[in-house]
Image (spheres, helix red, strand yellow):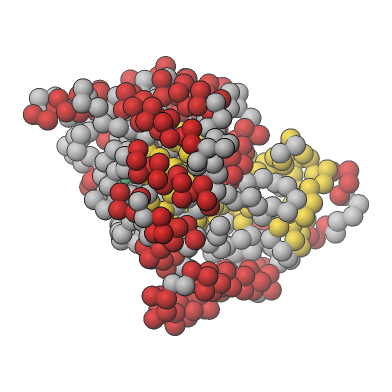
């Protein structure tokens, strides 16, 4: 296939990527000037050495094709106006035309066309909720490992959460540290959320500094986050934050759980309950926690309505698990005109509490995975369009924090590691519900790009950035220990092994799909004789 040759050729070809790198370095320079991050000045020598050489060299190898102007063809191109058989024309990293078959065949020189046949060309996934833990907790995950796993999973843009790294991203300065840590170490486009915490919530100029410095929006917790320098906010903090966000027309993402006094969580303080029991954990964080948080949020989300004091701001509920009361409240608020969206995650759509073995802390996340009936309702809400989008909530930790030996659900780290597998998991588990490729593109690309304010990403449309995933929905692979995993901790990659456990338990054939992947180093990975290519044209940080 031409792309194999194309890829190898690119390893030695400089022309296209020089433009890429020029653009990349320029964006960094202008950002630095713009932001006035003067404290970075002492590092600039090193910084430009890094970018000028390392980054140039590595990115030189990342272009798909030795042309800045080329076409990719397929019988299944997922566009906002449906599935098209034809070509996407790419020039300088942007989509300049999408042509149906009969229109392109005459006009395009064959050498500049990569024909993927029946493979699906979709917009690259935009994951708006992942914790890359870098700087400071690189032993949990990092920009290189995390973005590489993302690329291998078809994600071309990732927005990093402000907590789990050290320090948390809660100021212009700490955002600067993120940029520094990401520089030259990312394989896909990366943007950042900033944190809304009690310390900055009433300090509008601090929040503005964070937003002006490039944070795409803010994130806050309504319960303890598990991270000391990321304390929880109350509704007054959130109300204030929304006023600042309104000015910048940016979203607030909220972890919506408020601890309730009646919860088993408190009852177990004396250690009477068995901490290995998933049921005990589930009861310790009941749906009433989510419901209480949503009820509280609705007292301020109305401010985001047209004519309201926070018009322009937007409230986004992350990782909804409760498909009952909490979901109904969100749905009503949206109907009333509150500017709100909600996401759920593949683990809530794939697993159910009844099947989680006691002591298996790979399944621990917050809010918890609930019962099978709840899972069905989540799927229905997603398919009806009432849950707007999906995200990974990739939240890895050092393996020892999962306490695999003790299997203590109450003390183990809460977080599931899933980045590389969100596309095949969504597709595979969605088969039962007859989900379509267009729905996948909406949940994983179009809506998340919109949330992050990336108006030039998330769709295969003229003028959009040329970020794609090319994959074969019909091809299956076994998710076993031989499967290459790029997360920092592949062995304890909770989600991966969890899925395997499930599949083996049920003795079903693995129904996961294979996608092509093309890594930055131009390493072609072959699975079952199929060439894997994911390609992306823009290697740059995302700026608002
Ligand atoms: N700190 C952190 O990443 N917490 C995440 N983990 C999880 O399971 N839910 C979360 O919010
Ligand atoms: Zn959360
Ligand atoms: Zn999270």
Q: Is residue 170 left or right of residue 51?
A: left
Spot occupied by residue 164 in the image (x, y as percentages of width and height): 32, 52
Query: Would you place residue 425 above or below residue 228 in this image?
Result: above
Q: Quadrant of residue 1?
A: bottom right
Q: Is residue 149 visible?
A: no
Residue placed furthest toward the right: 106
The residue depicted at 70 percent of the width and 46 percent of the height is 460
Q: Is residue 135 visible?
A: yes
Between 384 and 479, the one lying in front of the other is 384
Spot occupied by residue 495 in the image (x, y as percentages of width and height): 38, 39
The residue depicted at 85 percent of the width and 59 percent of the height is 109
Between 475 and 190, the one lying in front of the other is 190
Q: Is residue 448 left or right of residue 229?
A: right
The residue depicted at 50 percent of the width and 41 percent of the height is 309
Residue placed furthest toward the top: 373
Between 389 and 492, the one lying in front of the other is 389
């Amino acid at each position: 296939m031409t792309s194999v040759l194309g890829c190898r050729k690119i390893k030695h070809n400089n022309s296209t990527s020089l433009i890429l790198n020029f653009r990349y370095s320029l964006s960094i320079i202008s950002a630095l000037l713009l932001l006035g991050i003067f404290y970075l000045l002492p590092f600039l020598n090193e910084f430009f050495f890094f970018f000028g050489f390392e980054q140039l060299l590595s990115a030189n190898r990342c272009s798909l094709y030795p042309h800045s102007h080329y076409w990719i063809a397929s019988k299944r191109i997922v566009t906002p106006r449906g599935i098209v058989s034809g070509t996407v024309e790419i020039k300088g990293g942007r989509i300049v035309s999408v042509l149906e078959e009969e229109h392109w065949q005459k006009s395009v020189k064959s050498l500049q066309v990569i024909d993927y046949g029946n493979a699906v060309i979709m917009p690259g996934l935009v994951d708006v909720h992942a914790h890359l833990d870098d700087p400071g907790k690189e032993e949990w995950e990092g920009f290189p490992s995390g973005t590489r796993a993302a690329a291998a999973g078809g994600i071309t843009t990732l927005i990093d959460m402000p907590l789990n790294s050290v320090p948390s991203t809660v100021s212009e300065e700490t955002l600067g540290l993120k940029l520094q840590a990401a520089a030259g170490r990312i394989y896909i486009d990366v943007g950042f959320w900033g944190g809304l915490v009690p310390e900055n919530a009433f300090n509008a100029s601090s929040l503005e500094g964070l937003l002006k410095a490039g944070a795409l929006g803010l994130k806050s917790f309504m319960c303890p986050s598990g991270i000391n320098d990321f304390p929880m906010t109350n509704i007054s903090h959130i109300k204030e934050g929304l006023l600042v966000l309104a000015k910048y027309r940016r979203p607030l993402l909220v972890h919506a759980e408020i601890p309730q006094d009646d919860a088993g969580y408190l009852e177990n303080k004396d250690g009477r309950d068995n901490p290995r029991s998933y049921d005990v954990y589930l009861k310790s964080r009941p749906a009433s926690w989510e419901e209480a948080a949503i009820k509280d949020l609705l007292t301020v989300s109305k401010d985001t309505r047209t004519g309201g004091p926070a018009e322009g701001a937007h409230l986004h509920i992350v990782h909804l698990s409760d498909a009952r009361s909490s979901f109904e409240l969100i749905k009503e608020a949206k109907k009333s005109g509150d500017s709100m969206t909600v996401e759920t995650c593949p683990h809530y759509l794939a697993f159910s509490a009844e099947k989680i073995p006691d002591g298996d802390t790979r399944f621990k996340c917050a809010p918890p995975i609930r019962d099978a009936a709840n899972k069905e309702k989540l799927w229905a809400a997603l398919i009806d369009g009432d849950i707007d989008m999906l995200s990974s909530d990739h939240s890895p930790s050092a393996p020892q924090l999962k306490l695999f030996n003790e299997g203590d659900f109450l003390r183990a780290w809460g977080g599931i590691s899933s980045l590389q597998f969100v596309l095949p998991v969504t597709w595979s588990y969605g088969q039962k519900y007859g989900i379509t490729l267009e729905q996948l593109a909406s949940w994983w690309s179009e809506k998340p790009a919109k949330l992050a304010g990336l108006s030039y990403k998330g769709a295969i449309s003229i003028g959009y950035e040329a970020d794609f995933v090319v994959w074969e929905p019909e091809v299956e692979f076994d998710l076993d220990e031989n499967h290459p995993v790029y997360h920092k901790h592949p062995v304890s990659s909770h989600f991966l092994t969890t899925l395997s456990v499930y599949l083996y338990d049920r003795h079903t054939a693995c129904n996961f799909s294979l996608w092509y992947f093309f890594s930055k180093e131009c390493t072609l990975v072959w699975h079952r004789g199929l060439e894997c290519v994911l390609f992306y044209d823009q290697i740059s940080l995302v700026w608002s």
